[in-house]
Image (tube, rainbow, N blue to C red):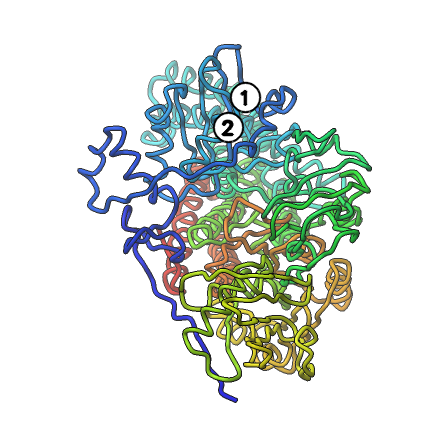
């Protein structure tokens, strides 16, 4: 018996249109490759509509024709109820809608989509939000409809992603508008207070014209009121919440510094004894708000919270009295007949009534192989039909389906509790020490020189204000989140950085995470096959919708399809037929009446020609590039485990890679995955879970940090703390190391701040440091900390080989 192996060779192609790297070679026209459907289509569309001036800036035009759209694909958009829920605006003449387009890839996509009015006069305007991958379309109701807009987008390669979740009222994730207003107010007031304080700085407090001095002081007091009573309220609320829980967070000493500087300034200005320190108070508030807004912007465009409605279609084709009509999924009830076409998601549990079903449950159970189902068998919600059209009789409505029940676990109902940041733990001791020093200084000077009590206490609180510590944490985390985002790793919030840095265990899902869905390495064992035999096998395999048959067709060399007579397929077993009087039979060992191999868990397709066994094709999962090095690097710093919903056919291979100290479990249900994570946490482990499917959602939520692997960062990723683009999975050890680096930078900046405080406090306690000089030193310290954190964040990223821009 011979062994012939075909190892696919990965070849990188450059997009003929835009010049960017192509993720794969699936989009091809003659000898030209394209990175996306937009580039594939754009040249022909531009040329046809007289827009070729664009190519004065480009040297790589692409060619293609519009894609065909199934006539009834978007029929549900004609439903007035659905339409009104999706539209952003309508006045009967013009309507505006926003669609999510996961296919948006490059500048050519944006250019094409913003010229939709050239393709159809009914489009008034279109604007693309590239970070969110959405398009806002304004169209005329007289010549266009919502359905036609969706069909137009689909025809040029940008099919809108519309789910049941789009019909629900939901808050748009964006930077807090109130925080932006508070920042604007603080910035305006701070700038003007600084300007009015310049004479005080340059004269050393000895302004000759007392009238101007008093005028500037009262103007500063007026400008400080919006900062104190409005912009700083965020810090008051945070500190108060901490005190109610008997916990001193980082905002407590900041609020104390704001109060002391403000009321001391009010006293000095109203009594005529000084000009106060309102510039320091306004500066503290402005810099703190700037850091928080900066951090907000780093993750505002991604959605980390998903429920089952994010995966459901809006409508489904229902059969009523022999007619096919589209109705909302929420209106489907037991007893209804629905039609599911190829690659459509099954939204409800039902019994197969007609057709051949090959259901892909990989997103629900993790099992990579589609399951063949016969008439009368139950099909569960969440599966995707990989064959032709099938008809189901509904047995449960949406709210009772299997997919919905995955969210009934309490882990989805209760928000994941985040551990307090180590910044807040430091702040607790910092605040106690600060208050102790201030009280001690007050007691000392009340005995020695009562006139120095207030200057000393005020200088201590200004100099020792922990704003440098908070700024270092805020800006360091913001820089780290921005750097990670540029490298395809998106974090939900800053606390995820600390969680990743403190993790000591990483748990992987297999299907779709370390292995690639829809891709297999195929080998052949048996008698050598000639071109004629391969053509016969390929022609028979083309008749089947089974996923192994489709893989086999792709593997065998291209050849003319021969006519198959007396074709017969036995679901789940194999297929047979006659080609030019030659009987061909392909399928399982049992289907060909041969002895089953000991390692039969491997996917095998046996071949018989004229009742003679020729051999078999073996199908092995294809793992992501760099997977072995990824596991090797992680084993140096973390304990590893693998939880898979798939069978254990590749356990020997994976055991060699993960090593004897790692735990590998197969045939795991979503509940078993969740329980495994929970058990490890009870042992004291801090667990990072990496998964991609709905079956991983419970484990992702239960883990200390859940990383959802996604081919597209905005589409079909379950609820998580982080989203990692699939192409960057091999960089996970670097990302975890960079998170630890961020914590070290914060600690280093804190040490610098403490050294500064020790020096400043030495003078302040002795009463030799005027509050004015302390007020000037505070922003200098803060700016130096910002420069330090920014510089070292970039330096660490460069050292680790991360993309900087």
How far separated are the C-alphas under marks 1 and 2?
A: 7 Å
Tell whether 75 sits left or right of 759: right
Of 729 and 47, which appears nearest the observer? Answer: 47
Horizontal and vertical percent for residue 697? 68, 53
Position of 470 with respect to 801 (left or right) is right
Badge 2 marks a residue whose secondary structure is strand
Report how many numbered discs are placed on residues in the image. Answer: 2
Which residue is the site of mark 1? Answer: 88
Between 422 and 528, the residue placed more toward the observer is: 528
User: Helix, strand or loop at disc 1?
Assistant: strand
Query: Residue 230, position in %: x, y?
Result: 57, 24
Vertical position of residue 252 compared to residue 717: above or below: above
Tell me where residue 498 appears, x and y as whole percent: 58, 56
Q: Is residue 417 above or below residue 150?
A: below
Instruction: List the residue tagged with mark 2.
Output: 98
Question: Can see residue 688?
Answer: no
- Asked if the residue at tag 2 contacts the one at tag 1, i.e. Cβ–Cβ closer than 8 Å, the answer is yes
Q: Residues within 10 Å of mark 2 (few under 14, many from 20)?
A: some
For label 1, the crowd category at 10 Å Cα-Cα, with few meaning under 14, some 14 to 19 and many 20 or more, is some
Examine the rendering and report whether any part of residue 123 can be seen: yes
Image quadrant assignment for residue 661: bottom right
Q: Earlier in the sequence, mark 1 or mark 2?
A: 1
């Amino acid at each position: 018996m011979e062994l012939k192996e075909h190892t696919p060779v990965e070849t990188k192609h450059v997009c003929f249109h835009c010049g960017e790297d192509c993720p794969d070679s699936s989009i091809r026209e003659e000898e030209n490759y394209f990175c996306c459907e937009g580039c594939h289509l754009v040249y022909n569309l531009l040329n046809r509509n007289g827009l070729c001036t664009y190519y004065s800036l480009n040297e790589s035009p692409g060619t293609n024709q519009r894609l065909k759209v199934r006539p009834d694909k978007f029929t549900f958009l004609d439903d007035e109820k659905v339409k009104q829920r999706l539209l952003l605006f309508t006045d009967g003449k013009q309507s505006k809608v926003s669609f999510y387009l996961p296919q948006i890839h490059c500048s050519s996509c944006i250019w094409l989509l913003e010229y939709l009015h050239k393709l159809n006069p009914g489009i008034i305007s279109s604007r693309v939000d590239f970070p969110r991958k959405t398009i806002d379309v304004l169209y005329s109701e007289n010549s266009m409809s919502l359905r036609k807009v969706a069909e137009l987008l689909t025809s040029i390669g940008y099919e809108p992603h519309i789910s049941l979740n789009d019909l629900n009222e939901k808050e748009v994730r964006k930077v807090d508008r109130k925080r932006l207003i508070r920042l604007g107010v603080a910035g305006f007031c701070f700038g003007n207070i600084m300007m009015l304080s310049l004479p005080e700085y340059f004269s050393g407090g000895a302004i000759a014209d007392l009238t101007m001095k008093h005028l500037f002081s009262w103007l500063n007091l007026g400008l400080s009121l919006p900062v104190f009573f409005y912009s700083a309220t965020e810090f008051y609320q945070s500190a108060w919440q901490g005190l109610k829980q008997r916990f001193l967070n980082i905002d407590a000493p900041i609020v104390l510094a704001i109060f002391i500087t403000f009321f001391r300034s009010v006293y000095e200005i109203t009594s005529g004894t000084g000009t106060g320190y309102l510039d320091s108070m306004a500066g503290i508030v402005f810099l703190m708000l700037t850091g928080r807004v900066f951090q907000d912007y780093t993750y505002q465009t991604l959605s980390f919270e998903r429920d089952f409605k994010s995966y459901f279609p809006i409508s489904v084709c229902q059969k009523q009295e022999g007619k096919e009509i589209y109705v909302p999924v929420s209106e489907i009830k037991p007893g209804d007949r629905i039609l599911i076409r190829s690659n459509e998601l099954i939204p409800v549990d039902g019994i197969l009534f007609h057709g051949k079903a090959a259901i892909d449950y990989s997103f629900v159970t993790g099992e990579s192989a589609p399951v063949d189902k016969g008439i009368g068998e139950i099909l569960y919600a969440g599966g995707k039909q990989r064959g032709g059209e099938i008809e189901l009789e509904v047995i449960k409505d949406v709210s009772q389906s299997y997919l919905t029940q995955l969210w009934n676990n309490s882990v989805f109902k209760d928000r994941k509790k985040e551990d307090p940041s180590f910044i807040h733990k430091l702040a607790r001791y910092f605040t106690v020490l600060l208050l102790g020093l201030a009280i001690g200084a007050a007691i000392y000077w009340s005995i020695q020189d009562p006139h120095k009590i207030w200057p000393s206490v005020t200088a201590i609180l200004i100099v020792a204000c922990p704003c440098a510590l908070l700024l270092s944490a805020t800006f360091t985390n913001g820089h780290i989140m921005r750097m990670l985002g540029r490298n395809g790793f998106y974090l939900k919030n800053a606390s995820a950085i600390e969680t990743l840095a403190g993790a000591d265990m990483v748990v992987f899902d297999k299907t779709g995470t370390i292995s690639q869905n829809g891709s297999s390495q195929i080998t052949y064992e048996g008698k050598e096959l000639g071109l004629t035999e391969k053509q016969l096998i390929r022609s028979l395999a083309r008749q089947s919708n089974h996923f192994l048959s489709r893989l086999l067709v792709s593997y065998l060399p291209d050849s003319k399809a021969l006519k198959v007579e007396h074709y017969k397929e036995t679901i789940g077993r194999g297929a047979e037929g006659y080609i030019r009087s030659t009987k061909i039979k392909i399928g399982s060992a049992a289907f060909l009446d041969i002895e089953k191999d000991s390692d039969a868990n491997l996917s095998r397709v046996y071949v018989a020609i004229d009742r003679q066994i020729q051999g078999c094709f073996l199908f092995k999962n294809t793992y992501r590039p760099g997977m072995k090095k990824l596991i090797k690097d992680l084993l140096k710093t973390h304990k590893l485990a693998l939880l898979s919903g798939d069978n254990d056919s590749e356990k020997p291979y994976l055991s060699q890679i993960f090593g004897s100290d790692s735990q590998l479990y197969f045939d795991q249900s979503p509940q078993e995955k969740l329980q495994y994570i929970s058990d490890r946490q009870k042992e004291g482990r801090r667990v990072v879970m990496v998964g991609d499917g709905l079956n991983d959602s419970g484990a992702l939520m239960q883990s200390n940090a859940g990383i959802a692997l996604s081919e597209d960062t905005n589409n079909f990723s379950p609820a998580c703390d982080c989203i990692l683009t699939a192409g960057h999975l091999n960089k996970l050890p670097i990302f975890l190391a960079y998170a630890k680096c961020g914590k070290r930078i914060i600690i280093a900046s804190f040490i610098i701040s403490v050294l500064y405080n020790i020096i400043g406090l030495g003078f302040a306690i002795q009463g030799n440091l005027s509050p004015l000089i302390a007020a000037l030193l505070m922003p200098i310290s803060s700016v130096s900390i910002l420069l330090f954190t920014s510089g070292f964040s970039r330096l660490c990223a460069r050292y680790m080989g991360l993309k900087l821009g």
